[in-house]
Image (cartoon, helix red, strand yellow):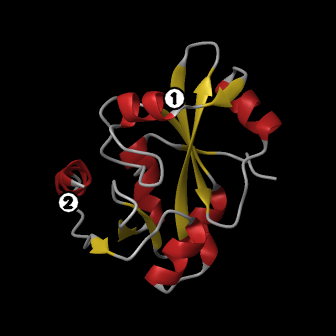
Amino acid sequence: MKRVRAALDAAGITAQIVEVGTARTAQEAAEAAGCHLDQIAKSIIFRAEATDEAVLFLTAGGNKVCADKANALADSPLGKADAALIRAQTGFAIGGVSPIGHLSPIRAWIDPRLLEFDVVWAAAGTPRHIFPIDPQRLPPLTGAEPADFTL
């Protein structure tokens, strides 16, 4: 959570990090935030088999990543990222991966559905903390490119 706060502060974003009962799933996060399911920015991490690095797909809460589209964007077959790879590259545990504040840079893409909202909510580094953000701020903060990668 400290790295997320530091990343927000460095970007001049005054978002309040909110502690909730649990936000391990997009549905739980949406209920806690009182927002539409698609206003949850899910951080979906895969392992790029060509480089053995993690890649990030920021997806609207109700959408699912299409494997074929994601593989094409990553220019590599994608596999399941295990907990060790996710923690090593992002510094976060599964269930609380934030789109910002990673330990190492990560290639990323963002679901255009997220950009349709004035505010979206994302994990703040733990399964119990979320924060609101203008989704237009996410591409420059994360390096994520808008792309069609959902089913």
Q: Give the x, y percent position of residue 16.
A: 25, 73
- The amino acid beneath tag 1 is Ala
* Left or right: residue 146 compared with residue 64: left
Q: Nearer the viewer, residue 116 or 64?
A: 64
* Left or right: residue 26 compared with residue 128: right
* Placement of 31 over or under 42, stated as above or below: below
* Placement of 98 over or under 33, stated as above or below: above
Q: Give the x, y percent position of residue 117.
A: 55, 74
* Placement of 29 over or under 6, stated as above or below: below
- The amino acid beneath tag 2 is Gly
Q: Nearer the viewer, residue 66 or 26?
A: 26
Residue farthest toward the top in the current orientation of the protein: 50
Q: Nearer the viewer, residue 83 or 90?
A: 83
Q: Residues within 10 Å of mark 2 (few under 14, many from 20)?
A: few
The residue where tag 2 is placed is 12
Is residue 117 among what the camera can see? Answer: no
The residue where tag 1 is placed is 54
Is residue 124 among what the camera can see? Answer: yes
Q: Residue at x 63, y 13 (%)?
A: 50
Measure how far apart labels 2 and 1 are at the Cα level: 27 Å
Secondary structure of residue under mark 2: loop
Task: Answer with mark 2 or mark 1, whichever residue precedes in sequence.
Answer: 2
Secondary structure of residue under mark 1: strand
Q: Give the x, y percent position of residue 56.
A: 54, 39
Q: Residue at x 52, y 82 (%)?
A: 31
Q: Give the x, y percent position of residue 62.
A: 69, 67
The quadrant holding residue 122 is bottom left
Labels in figure, total: 2
- Observer-side mark, 2 or 1, equals 1
